[in-house]
Image (tube, grey):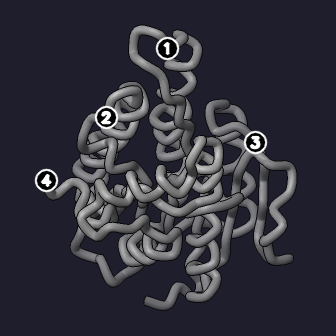
Amino acid sequence: MRLEKVTALVTGANSGIGQAVCSHFRREGARLVLTGRREQLDSARPEDVYVPGDLNDEAFVESLARQASETFGTVDAVVLNHGLQVSSPLTEMAYDDAKNVLHSNLLSSFLVMKHFAPLMPATGGSFVCVSSRLGMVGKSEEVLYSAAKGGLIMLAKGAAIEWAPRNIRVNVVAPGLTATPVIEASFQRRSDPEATRRQREGQIPLQRLATPEEVADAVLFLASSESSYITGAVLPVDGGYTAF
């Protein structure tokens, strides 16, 4: 599964799953183009290219693709790990929040796919979209997020069919609840964080949260030649949550 001479773009590289994906790809020898909203990425190597910006802005995505091309020539793998989650009852959700959720999870991914697919070599490449268990099942107060992540799954499936003649594979990892800093912070905001954690873990057949590294293992597999005959697939990494 070595990735020597492979150039990969990782979005949402700042923390959590994105940071774990970067660590896995570095271990396997990949050259990395990274992006996120923070001005700096503390974990970046000197040889990594980090370009902060807003993936909802097509001009920025075009400039990111141009910089990747000028630096490395081609891009072999793209991991779409960015997104935004806003929890709210459907009838109380502000329209601007709804648009932000759809843009940040779905339309921004379309923009990256649009501008980075032409950079993939003639031999092909791989896109891995990080969706969510909530792209496969619904949940109260997560309706727009679920719609956006479900749309990301269908975007990936359609692109997998369209780009199969070019040997560009497009797959999806659908994580369950994962022990990222964002999720850990959400527990701490509750009146009884430990009770909240136990309640959420009790909804998962394996009775625990995923680690970012476990999700990154699945991303690495789908990005690498180990999955060379897999495209248009959705791989849940959710402890059995969507098996019900």
Residue sitting at x 64%, y 82%? 26
Which residue matches tag 1? 93
Element type where label 3 sits in the image = loop
Whether tag 2 and tag 1 are in contact, CB under 8 A, the answer is no
Q: Amino acid at mark 3?
A: Gly
Label count reads: 4
Residue 231 visible in this rendered orientation of the protein: no
- Mark 1 and mark 4: Cα distance apart in space: 28 Å
Location of residue 38 with respect to 15 vertically, above or below: above
Per the rendering, the mark at residue 219 is none
Q: Residues within 10 Å of mark 4 (few under 14, many from 20)?
A: few
- Mark 4 and mark 3: Cα distance apart in space: 39 Å
Q: Amino acid at mark 2?
A: Lys
Which residue matches tag 3? 53
Residue sitting at x 62%, y 72%? 22
Element type where label 4 sits in the image = loop
- Please give left or right for residue 162 compared with residue 37 in the image: left
Q: Which residue is more in the foreground, 45 or 204?
A: 204
In front: label 3 or label 1: 1
- Mark 2 and mark 4: Cα distance apart in space: 14 Å
Location of residue 151 with respect to 120 vertically, above or below: above
Residue sitting at x 53%, y 57%? 194
Q: Which residue is more in the foreground, 158 or 134?
A: 134
- Mark 3 and mark 2: Cα distance apart in space: 30 Å
Which residue matches tag 4? 244
Which residue matches tag 2? 139
Element type where label 1 sits in the image = loop
Q: Amino acid at mark 1?
A: Met
Of callouts 1 and 4, which one flags the residue occurring earlier in the amino acid sequence? 1
